[in-house]
Image (cartoon, rainbow, N blue to C red):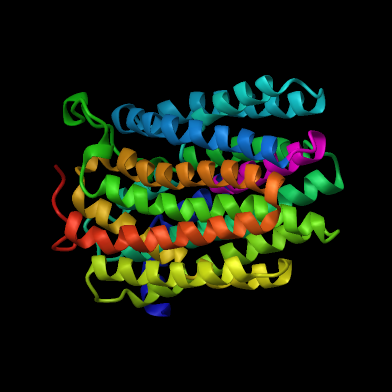
Amino acid sequence: MANRYGELFRTPGVVTLALAGGVARLPGAMVGIGVITMLSLTQNSYGLAGAVAATLTLAAAFLSPQVSRLADRYGQSRVLPPAVGIGASALLALALCSWLSAPPWALFVCAALAGCLPSIPAMTRARWARLLDGRTLLPTAFALDSVLSELAFVIGPPLAIALCMGWFAEAGPICAVLMLLLGAAVLLRQKATEPPVHPDAQHGGRPALFLRPVPTLALLLGTLGAINGAIDVTAVAIAKAEGSPSAASWVLALYALGSATGGLTFGALKPALPLGRLLLYCCVATALSSILIALAPDSAWLAAAMLLSGLSFAPTLIVAMEMVEKSVPRARLTESLTWLVTGIQLGLAGGASLCGLLTDDYGPRAGQSLALAAGLAALLVASMLPRAAIRKDVKPAC
């Protein structure tokens, strides 16, 4: 394990990019659960909280690929500042509306405008591809990047919930905005790793979503996002019913910890199996762990089940990113990677919104059943993928 990561960290520029990417993605781990917690406290409705959070996620799912496409064309240094500025302003307006008890339509408008926030993970992964172009260490770098993302989800949700519960309801989203501004500034300082600007002629007229195997992998990651969205709401509901709302943060943190552990191990071992087979094995593990999620009777058991479920999340994402990196033109890489993130976000939006409605009517157990359905769907999509998109691991881009 030490050899591959040791070689990676000896590569010039790796340490600074890892630190910058780690700082820049932390706010993204705070926003969703921060909005859910804030609105569940101020509006006293899980349905509304889940729907507003889903609106933000859904807007980001459609807008962030367009931001990434602009970044491929004109450069991250020109596109990130205005995108971050608009998104941060909208999040502050959402917190103000919550504090003023504004009507629901105002919450939805602010959440939709916040969707222009850029996909920091996709921007960072494009920088890894630039820094390690042609090197065999790129899968290990993707693994490290996934671990940094999961560490953000270990720290971010507990921090957001603690701020909302312990200070005031809007503290979590406001803190996320401040950290977003800082993180984007730190990332933009890494000039040496910024991907080159590509001429418009290299982009064509259609979105990168139509490049194989991007759409199938985005659908697969959407099922994993649905598990996350359902658990975001379910964990808060179960913990609040048990009289210990802060316990929800540990459920989400253990899921992220499991994913970080799985990603770190995967990046060190670099299994020699075909990518399609690796992906299928990861989704088998996801489906089995989703059964445990559905059967969990309380927060403690749910946290343990989420820890096991997380072990397969980062490896699934790493394999999917490697497939895309090998398949699409470099001029479309940031946008293509963002569509994978979009798949996760759409799953999050659907999972959080549906779970909020079901929880209001039927209680937390409905959310656990929704997570099970998503886990089985992941296995179904993965079982179809080798025949549909990657008969020889990865097909060339369309």
**Residue 101, position as x, y percentages in the image:** 80, 24
Secondary structure, magenta segment, majority class: helix
Q: Does 384 appear above or below 37?
A: below
Instruction: Using the rendered image of the protein, determine whether residue 32 is visible from the camera's viewpoint.
Output: yes
Q: Is residue 207 magenta?
A: no
Instruction: Using the rendered image of the protein, determine whether residue 189 is visible from the camera's viewpoint.
Output: no
Q: Is residue 41 magenta?
A: yes
**Residue 270, position as x, y percentages in the image:** 32, 74
In the picture provided, is 241 more to the left or to the right than 380?
A: right
Identify which residue is drawn at 77% across, 36% down. 170
In the picture provided, is 87 more to the left or to the right than 272?
A: right
In the picture provided, is 337 more to the left or to the right than 113?
A: left
User: Magenta part of the protein: which range?
Assistant: 25-45
Q: Does 201 appear above or below 242?
A: above
**Residue 174, position as x, y percentages in the image:** 72, 35
Identify which residue is drawn at 49% across, 62% down. 147
Identify which residue is drawn at 28% across, 38% down. 209
